[in-house]
Image: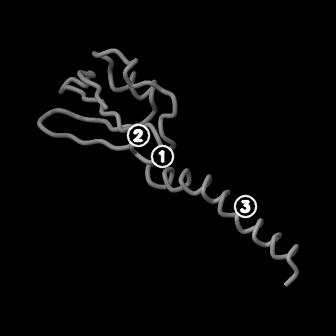
Amino acid sequence: MKPGKAFGILTLVLTEFMVLGCVLPHAMFVAEYGRLPLHGRDPFAIPKGSTKDEVRAALGSPHDRSVKDNVEIWYYHGDLFEMATYRMEFDAKGRLVNCWW
């Protein structure tokens, strides 16, 4: 094989890996959660006492939810790798009582 052709093939393969490395994490996240992470939206900017509808309007639908003892927690991921997970805690009346990271 000629050196120029080998270099061209290597460049093509490396380019494909780079493209997949950029696209694949996004695609996998959307496949798992149905939408992308927050990316710049600040959960801490939402005032305590906000309703679930107000939180949903500001941040979108949660990536995950849990309910225990009349407390509902919505989970939002701030990045593709779930290293920044925000938790929005609602009381039995559906009002935001706490937000933590």
Q: Is residue 26 left or right of residue 1?
A: left
Q: Secondary structure at mark 1?
A: loop
Q: Residue at x 26, y 35 (%)?
A: 73
Q: Secondary structure at mark 3?
A: helix
How packed mark 3 is, by other alpha carbons closer than 10 Å (few <14, some 14-19, many 20 or more), is few
Q: Secondary structure at mark 2?
A: strand
Q: Amino acid at mark 2?
A: His
Q: CA distance from mark 3 to mark 1?
A: 22 Å
In this view of the protein, which residue sits in the foreground, 12 or 70?
12
Q: CA distance from mark 2 to mark 1?
A: 7 Å
Q: Position of residue 40 (x, y in %)?
A: 51, 28
Residue 7's place in the image compared with 27, above or below, is below
Residue 20: quadrant of the picture:
bottom right
State the residue position of label 3.
15
Labels 2 & 1 near each other (Cβ < 8 A) = yes
Residue 79's place in the image compared with 6, above or below, is above
Give the quadrant of the C terminus: top left
Q: Which mark is residue 77?
A: 2
In this view of the protein, which residue sits in the foreground, 1 or 79?
1
